[in-house]
Amino acid sequence: PDPIASSTTQFAVHFIDVGTGDAAIIDMGDREIIIDGGNSTRVLNAYAERTGIIDGPIELVVVTHGDTDHWKGLTRLLGFDGVVDNPKTVQEYWDAGYNRDCNPASSGGRINYLKFIEDMRGIVPPARFRRPLATHHVPAVVSGTPQTFTLPSLPAVTFTVLHTDASPTTGTCSSKINNPSIVLMIEIDGMRFLFTGEA
């Protein structure tokens, strides 16, 4: 798709059809943000290869929560499954911090998710591995006031963390996995986008 033109920044937000789950890439030329990766190991990587959308390292990867259909698609793109010759690198990683402990045996459950987290920790600089995110950026549901911030690697982007929870205590197992989701508002040159995971 054509990028959205604005007065100071040219960017495009790609919402990728991954079937069940979510995957989005915010492309700002030589800088990218990926929010979730879908369930298929093939779709996100194939989209990135076909479009050539990722230039150099990915500035930020956000996994909103531990359901497989939000992180598994990142595994091929980042080389965790050993299939791609030139895996992408990541400068910063955000995660809600809940290990989906309520159902460790489910398909794509706790064991696979913790392996993914371990693999992410191996490629992201320790100072930029933000898990749980709330210990680095207090969400508005805790502070009572939305707090905006930018990252040095993404100066044109304003972030607001509206929600994230590393220790859900109530609800069904499915709710406990979904409700920790990072809910993130991103603003680029006056245009706002809301990413909700499955909160």
Image (cartoon, rainbow, N blue to C red):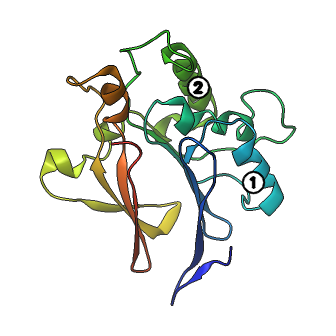
Query: Which three-letter amino acid code belongs to the residue tagged 1?
Result: Tyr
Q: Which residue is mark 1?
A: 47
Name the residue furthest left. 144
Measuring from the top left, give residue 30's x and y in whole percent: 68, 66
According to the picture, the residue beneath numbered tag 2 turns out to be: 116
Label 2 vs 1, first from the N-terminus: 1
Secondary structure at badge 2 equals helix
Mark drawn on residue 29: none
Residue 48 location, x and y as percent?
75, 54
Residue at 72% x, 58% y: name it: 54
Horizontally, residue 132 falls left or right of residue 90, namely left
Q: Locate residue 165 relative to residue 170 in the image: left or right.
A: right
Q: CA distance from mark 2 to mark 1?
A: 21 Å
Q: Quadrant of the C terminus?
A: top left
Give me the residue at 51% from left, 64% from top.
154
Residue at image point 68% right, 36% down: 40
Residue 116 drawn above or below residue 190: above
Instruction: Please state if 189 lies on the left or on the right of 68 as rendered.
Output: left
Q: Quadrant of the N terminus?
A: bottom right
